[in-house]
Image: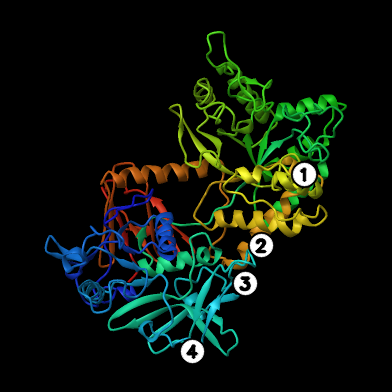
Amino acid sequence: MKRRAHPWRAAAVVMTTAGLIALGLGTPGASAAEEPRIDLKVLVVDNGDSPVDAITAQLESTGIPYTTIDLTDANRPTITDAFLSDTVNGTPRAKYQGVVLPNEAPFGSGSAEQTALESYETTYGIPQVDAYTWAHPGVGLDYTSEGGWAGTLDGRAAAVTDVGKAGYFGYLDGAFTFEDNDASVQESYGFVAKPRTGFTSYVDIPVPAGTGNGSLVGEYAHDGRRELVVTFAYNQYQQQFRVLARGIVEWLTQGVHLGQSRNYFAVHVDDVFAPDSRWDTERNCTPGDFDCVGGDGEGTTPIRMTAADAQYAAQWQQEHGFTLDMVYNAGSGEEWKSENGGTDELTDQLLADKTQYRWINHTYTHQYLGCVQDTTTVPWSCATNADGSTQYMSRADISAEVSSNYNWALTNGLPVDRSELVTGEHSGLKTLPQQPDDNPNLAGALADNGIAWTASDNSREPEQRTVGSSTLTVPRYPMNVYYNVGTDAEMVDEYNWIYTSAADGGSGVCENNPTSTCLDDSLDTATGYDTYIVPLEARTALGHVINNDPRPHYAHQSNLAEDRTLYPVMDEVLADYQALFADSAPVQNLAQAAIGTELQRRAAWQTAVDGGNVTAYRIGNTVTVTAPSGTQIPVTAPEGTTKQLLLGTTAFGTPYAGQRSAWTTPELLQSAVTLNLPA
């Protein structure tokens, strides 16, 4: 038996009464003492297939504790009555609130283990998810030969039924399309079938080459048991699973569990006020970079927003109800102004609209805050002292870069949070292979300036970590919209260079990176950005958004200038999201400090859970959770849930996707969080 840890994994929480868990109700007229205890932990029976892995990933992302039985492990425990249930202080206890199986009967129909599991589900009203199975009467469906169909679902449109919308899939607007990213690859296979008695379809599709609709996801109620039957194959990264994953898990848990899940999207725009260097389409490099042979950038036109670009940014925000984070270098802007006649319409316009944005300190002049770079070699290396030790930027110089930028913001009335910082190129933090450790002077300088949150590059360091004793990182996703391009054509030219093999005249970088693929043919510089790069980048970003991942994305001010290359990507992400999700599940657009706090709380919660210091249970309609003092506790519950105060109650949490959820702690003079679920 494998017990997988996760930032959210919790100890036991208790659920509702035997047999009526399907309705989320206690036994009518029964007292709380007569209710059974049902732990809110999920049993996952894993055969190694991707559908089980996908649901497990959603449990982890949401924060639901689970225990895994590995069917490939000869030493796994046997499923028995004692494994599934027992008695605690005289109260019958079901150890698992739901069961995830690879199919409807992985232990074999009629076997002792299958019989024990089915008896347990019947006795306690425990739901079961069949992660992927074929259409047949054993799961409440006709065979596909009886008016159904089996085949590839790539590119086909499916929809949530009215019953699905009224239940745990109501956070979706109804329709979605199966991914078809590669015409030469079968990405999703499924069985489309007609329901029999006892089966309620939640997601269906018009029967290809047939009539009417057939189910792909639905509930089969029979013999006192309930199964959620899924008849298409998937993995955790495919969009069709990602949009349905919340509903699958909420159905499994009946919407009462530790942890919470929301959809997040934030975009940082780096280098605001500063110009960015421009890609050279002839030399296939960026003049001014030390590795660009044949030029130092003199005579090239830098890329910098204009006042009109700033006006467009403010207007775009208002139209989309979305706030950009302007990550600014005031000193670089002042330098540009002094070199261009002493006036700057861009700065004037951004300051006029300053309250419409969030602002983040990006240091005064975007200096490299790590080791002193020796650019006589390619790639660069860290300069050394006479004794061979690494030369680093000093604490005083780092502090001056941070404080000067912050003070400029105060002078000009920018609504900036002193605790937030993004260093230039995430410098100061370790940069492999040249600088394997943080600049030892960085932590002190951050503390000197009250920096609680400093950005890191998610592609290098995906996990939050500490810098010194007072600062935590906030990993950011780099968007594949390059800092050194101002036009769509420049973007495509550089993209072609990077993603073309050396044999075909490209850089060959794609051949040496296991996560990338070389292009079969170069993209058309006139159309390739809109038709290829934008959809690809938007799909990647949307995948982060709908995966309960609060990490921000980042691009650069150059992408808001000239052809304004960033907007088509953001437009598509937001449009695709709005087409998929109902108004009850709005995008959460958080500031850097709020994102850092979310990641910090998840880590603290994991520590408490892993230490066995969390207890949570439900008896009847009362949920009780205890954790170490000061620990923020994440809980999701139905609408109408209240939190018990010392005297009286108050509404619990905030609404999201048809549920209510929050990080919470015990109230004054209380040792536990107590929630009252709606009757």
At label 2, counting other C-alpha atoms closer than 10 Å, the crowd grade (few under 14, some 14-19, many 20 or more) is few
User: Mark 2 is on which residue type?
Assistant: Ala
From the image, state whether disc 3 or disc 1 is nearer to you: 3
Q: Earlier in the sequence, mark 3 or mark 1?
A: 3
Q: Residue furthest front?
A: 503
Secondary element under disc 2, as helix, strand or loop, is helix
* Residue 591 point in image, percent of width and height: 57, 44
Q: CA distance from mark 1 to mark 4?
A: 60 Å
Q: Amino acid at mark 3?
A: Gly
Picture residue at 28% right of the left edge, 65% below the top? 15
Q: CA distance from mark 3 to mark 1?
A: 38 Å
Q: Nearer the viewer, mark 3 or mark 2?
A: 3
Q: Earlier in the sequence, mark 1 or mark 4?
A: 4
Residue at the (46%, 81%) spot, across then down: 201
Mark closest to the chain's N terminus, 1 or 2: 1
Q: Secondary structure at mark 4?
A: loop
Snapshot quadrant of residue 295: top right
Question: What residue is pinned by disc 1?
Answer: 310
Label 3 crowd (10 A; few <14 / some 14-19 / many >=20): some
Q: Does residue 131 appear in the picture of this structure?
A: yes
Q: Helix, strand or loop at disc 3?
A: loop
| Residue drawn at 50 percent across, 66 percent down | 241
**Label 4, label 3: how many angstroms apart (C-alpha)?**
23 Å
Q: How is the image coloured?
A: rainbow
Q: Earlier in the sequence, mark 2 or mark 4?
A: 4
The location of residue 476, given as percent across then percent down, is 57, 42
Residue lying farthest to the left in this orientation? 90
For mark 3, what is the residue? 155
